[in-house]
Amino acid sequence: MPKIAYFNGQYGPHHKAMVHIDDRGYQFADGIYEVCLVIGGRYWDMDGHLARMERSLSALRIRMPLGVASLQVVMNEVLRRNRLSDALVYIQVTRGVAPRNHPFPADEVPPALIITARRFDLDQSDAQAATGVRVITAPDIRWGRVDIKSISLLPNVLAKQAGVEAGAAEAWLVRNGKVTEGSSSNAWIVTDDGALVTHPKGHEILSGITRETALACARDLQIKVEERAFSVSEAQQAAEAFVTSATNLVTPVVQIDGVKVGDGAPGRVALRLREAYKARARRISGAQND
Ligand code: PDD
């Protein structure tokens, strides 16, 4: 069965889904995206994803391509046609198709919407979490509005590639001596007295939906949280480190630029938070199913 995608207002085989060469996403990276999870047929943290999508679009003055209810109908249909109930859904909206010219098109064109889905399992990154991952650091050369989930990801791609070439799973981006976030995840450390530290929300990080839920889990577990920036050397000397994202959930970091974090094994707090996160995802998705 070929994978089915939603593109140009229709459903069709993924391998035949083409965008117009004048799509402003293709020409200018003039668009936004979201990556969200479906667990047991239910959307997880969807309110957060929709709110961030609306914020990103409104910051770029692109209108929502569909109302929220219609968007969910299309997402459901993509899941149904791909026979998926545990999935990662990718949503992309660009300003649409118009002859290449920097200003917004004079005549309003409809935004272009793409929705794809692939199988995802909450446990699929367990093996990686059990060993932990290595990260490198790289200068954060991104623009000043990375809170917008823009498809313009070249600095992230280059940093991630530098990480991969160094045998690491992620690159932590450093601006003014402080770690802002990972190339596709939020960055965290755990202090010697067991408090979580992560960069505060603002224009310098993408406010992760997983980050928000991890904060809620930490509150439930009565773990102290400090939303402040930290340096690379503080992270290297921290008790633990980890990353959060929709695809990696909560994943322990065991090495930063070749320096072991703690004893070089996944930290207890990070693993506890990962379990709490997964339990919450299963509980809330399950409760919605009842
Ligand atoms: N990336 N920071 C950056 C730069 C990201 O690209 C992401 C997500 C996050 C975490 O956001 P969330 O918890 O909402 O997934 C933080 C997605 C998964 C991606 O680009 O594939």
Image: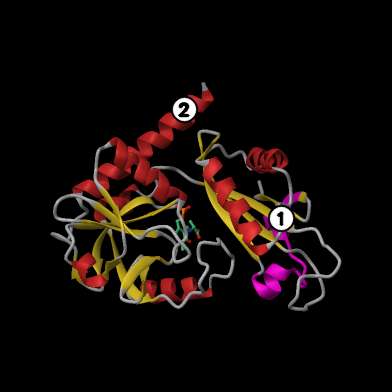
Q: Is residue 289 left or right of residue 193?
A: right
| Residue at horizontal 14 percent and vertical 51 percent from the top | 193
Image location of residue 235, percent across then percent down? 23, 65
Q: Is residue 38 left or right of residue 6?
A: left
Image location of residue 5, percent across then percent down? 68, 51
Local packing at callout 1 (Cα closer than 10 Å; few below 14, some 14-19, many 20+) is: many
Looking at the image, tell me whether mark 2 or mark 1 is earlier in sequence order: 1
Q: Which mark is residue 286?
A: 2
Image location of residue 245, percent across then percent down? 42, 53
Disc 2/disc 1 C-alpha distance (Å)? 29 Å
Q: What segment is highlighted magenta in the picture? A: 11-29
Q: Is residue 95 left or right of residue 260?
A: right
Asked whether residue 248 is drawn in magenta, I would say no
- Decide which of 60, 80 is in the foreground and name it: 60
| Residue at horizontal 21 percent and vertical 57 percent from the top | 240
Q: Quadrant of residue 103?
A: bottom right
Would you place residue 148 above or below residue 270 in this image? below
Q: Residue furthest right?
A: 107
Image location of residue 46, percent across then percent down? 55, 41
The residue indicated by pointer 1 is 113
What amino acid does circle 1 point to? Leu
Q: Residue furthest top?
A: 290
Res 165 visible: no
What amino acid does circle 2 point to? Gly
